[in-house]
Image (cartoon, rainbow, N blue to C red):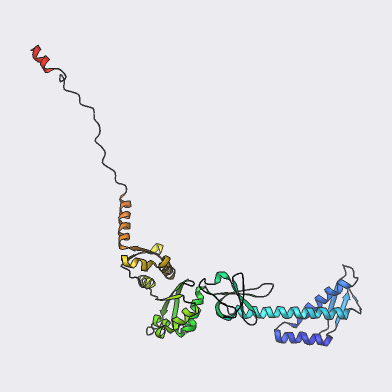
Amino acid sequence: MENELLTILEQLERDRGINKEILIAAVEAAVASAAKKIWSVDKEVEVKVTLDRETGKLTAWAGEQEIHSSEFGRIAAQTAKQVVIQKIREAEKDVVFNEYSVRLGQIISGAVYRFERGNIIVDLGKTEALVPRSEQSNKEEFRQGERIRAYLLEVRRETRGPQIILSRTNPNFVKRLFELEVPEIYEGIIEVKAIARDPGERTKIGVFSKDEKIDCVGACVGMRGSRVKNIVTELHGEKIDIVRYSDDIKEYIQAALSPAEISQMQLIADEKRVNIIVDEDQLSLAIGKYGQNVRLASKLVGWELDIYSAKQWEEKQKQAQAEQAGPTTPPAPPMAGPVAGPAAGADEDPAQEEEEA
């Protein structure tokens, strides 16, 4: 057993990368703890176990005195076995953690294993991953055994082992899909400037070509739409708007709100806000269903976008002018002066005056 133990520890060091000295220290501490429980030794006396690095022999000491016991060999064998198994499990957990930690931000592929409280448990082969309900699209449904791809969002250390968190709603999932489908993005010729996403419904992605000879939008769409169709299929029908990025914010906003046509823009740079005026027949198109188009466009360009029809804008301008002018004061009524009485003698009867004459 003695030589066998050393052989096992050396093999673990080679295969699992666990330092042999760490393993030996763990075995010594565990055997000493187990031995102290069955031997009648004062609590104040330290029980120490040493492992000979050449022969593999375990020796127990109570203080300065070596302990001889017929049960020590059995205890040592059982405890050493448990320690080795525990260290192997810990090493396996570390291997999984390290393997997936370096893959953060990449797309991971697996098979749907089971469902737990709305969460999807994915079988990755060596371990399992979790797609939380919050990281799933409401428009998607998966069946047990079905292949699934997702974005590696997080790797956590937990007592049970590494917890691998996947996402299908993260905007970067769409970016990674474009990198897989569009070689020009993967090679850095085309740059993804920004992504705004409403998972399961619509995504707007702003792209820019560093090579004037390459059309960034055409490259992302692909021949007859083949490239973008593959991404739409992966996202179970989610719509993709590919927007040409421009340093001119007006051009970028126009492209982001496409296919709506803009009649006029008013930039308020210090507030990063834009008033956008469109014709009446373009208003619903610019805003989109439940405000989706303007909301995603605003997130994509990083400016607040306010949409008005020409009539709404005119009314807003009139209201603003009225507020600037202040409230109109009605003309004051003429001041009431003293009531003029009749002229002196005016109240005398003329007939009476004739009689007196």
**So how many labels did they put on this image?**
0
- Against 115, residue 17 (above or below) is below
Residue furthest front as drawn: 143
Residue 326's spot in the image, x, y percent? 32, 49
Q: Quadrant of the N terminus?
A: bottom right
Where residue 215 sits, quadrant-wise, is bottom left
Q: Is residue 3 above or below residue 97?
A: below
Q: Position of residue 40 (x, y in %)?
A: 91, 71
Name the residue nearer the viewer: 248 or 298: 298
* Residue in view at x 42 percent, y 65 percent: 290
34 vs 230, nearest the viewer: 230
* Residue at x 83% of width, y 73% of height: 33
- Placement of the C terminus among the 4 image quadrants: top left
Image side of residue 227 versus residue 168, left or right: left
Is residue 55 visible to the viewer in this orientation of the structure? Answer: no
In the picture provided, is 192 more to the left or to the right than 285?
right
